[in-house]
Amino acid sequence: MAFESFTDFITMGKHGFYIWLSYGSALIILLVMGFNSFRQPKIQLDKIRQRMHREQQLKAYQQKKAEQRSQSHSGEAV
């Protein structure tokens, strides 16, 4: 083994703080990236569902408005 004790392994010859900080930072970044990669498809699907719902509402509103116009124009001709 390269180190005489576990404490020497942790301190890494007085460079332990920087080494373990680097490992910790890398681990946190990888965990965040992994979490986001699993969450992102759900977010995108939710956005697509919301957009489709808004488009359906807009289409129904436009059809209703067109029907009202056709009824009001047919009422004037009588």
Image (cartoon, grey):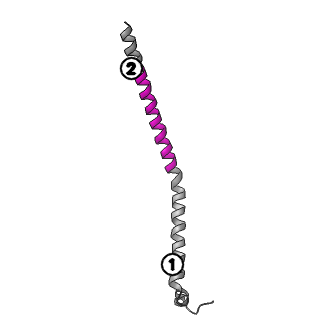
Name the residue carrying label 2. 68
42 is higher (above) or lower (below) than 74: below
Does the segment drawn in magenta span residue 60? yes
Corner quadrant of residue 61 = top left
Residue 57 placed where, x, y %? 43, 33
Residue 68 placed where, x, y %? 39, 20
Q: How many marks?
A: 2
User: Quick one: SS at disc 1?
Assistant: helix
Query: Residue at (52%, 66%) from the top-left corner?
Result: 31
Corner quadrant of residue 63 = top left
Query: Residue at (46%, 33%) from the top-left corner?
Result: 56
Precedes in sequence: disc 1 or disc 2: 1
Query: Bounds of the magenta span?
Result: 43-66
Q: Nearer the viewer, mark 1 or mark 2?
A: 2
Query: Residue at (37%, 15%) from the top-left corner?
Result: 72
- Amino acid type, callout 2: Gln
**Residue 21: which numbered mark, if any?**
1
> Quick one: 68 or 33, which is closer to the camera?
68
> Quick one: 31 or 72, which is closer to the camera?
72
